[in-house]
Amino acid sequence: MDKISLSIEELIYCFYSEGFFEQGNALKQVYFGDLDDEKMDLLLQISTRSLLSKSLVSYKNHKFTLVEELADIIATLNYSDQSIKVSRHDGEGGEKAVSYHLTGNGFIQHSLFYDEQIHVFSIVTLNEVSELVSDFYYIQNDRETGTNGFSLSQQEFEVMIDSLEDNSALFELPKYEGTKNNFYESLKESNGLLNTMLFFEFNEVKEPEATNLVLFTNNQANNWMIEKREEGFYVKPCNREMVKTLIENSIEVKVKETVSDGK
């Protein structure tokens, strides 16, 4: 399908239209909490006409109905077996985020623009997800990673991050060498900012539960991947193939067989 773009008002209307009142009410409270029912009803009427003009709603037998593609998107937003959310510091003090929700036809890419007022959706395959995520994090493809990974305890990692926020802590740092020093220099270049990649799934009551969390340094070159492990963290130089492997390993095998490149 082509990209589908919805305003926040249209998205609220879609949730109501499909009977997902809890989700619609939650968005209404966040974005239009002080709007009375009469004005909100008018806003939803305007959204209906807007969706009609985009051919995203049909009118038949005196009833408005979402087209099938849009109805599938709304159903997936309401519940998805598995999802990925990637977020990145944008260099202007803000943050950009994109989500990928698993469907029977692949993944729905969900992007937000203009302070989350505009939501854009499109269907992508599993392989496309890995490419899009690599682009999002500025991951290069020609970086040699070899066996240059190393472990950090929770305390060691916190000491590194704290030293970038408190100059006095620099004098208490141990001397780093080799790959560990390269990683620390990369952290300094980005002022310790870290980007996140969260894998999650919905439980029986439709609440998201995290299944895996991975961090990336916020550099446009020579990025590092930081995986959380029970004993601390494992840090390694990152390339695009590693991102693809990470995503594939975090998605169930039965899913990969059905959504990767449509096979």
Image (tube, rainbow, N blue to C red):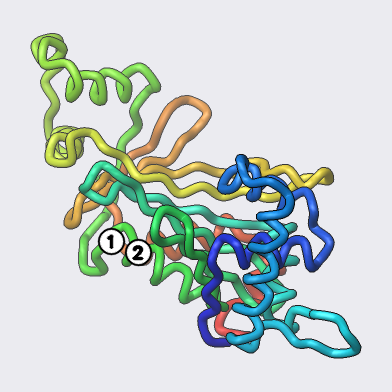
Question: What residue does disc 1 label?
Answer: 139
Helix, strand or loop under label 1: loop
Residue 146 position by quadrant: bottom left
Along the viewing direction, whichever of 73 and 135 lies nearer the viewer? 73
Q: Position of residue 82 (x, y in %)?
A: 66, 57
Along the viewing direction, whichever of 23 and 97 lies nearer the viewer? 23
Q: Position of residue 150 (x, y in %)?
A: 31, 36
- Is 151 drawn above or below residue 31 in the view shown? above
Helix, strand or loop under label 2: helix
The numbered disc on residue 165 is none
- Is label 2 in contact with label 1 (beta carbons under 8 Å)? yes
Residue at (68% x, 63% y) in the render: 42
Q: Amino acid at mark 1?
A: Ile
Residue at (12% x, 40% y) in the render: 189
Left or right of 163 in this view: 66 = right
Residue 60 position by quadrant: bottom right
Residue 172 position by quadrant: top left
Q: Amino acid at mark 2?
A: Ser
Residue at (55% x, 44% y) in the render: 212
Left or right of 60 in this view: 224 = left
The numbered disc on residue 134 is 2
Count of residue discs: 2
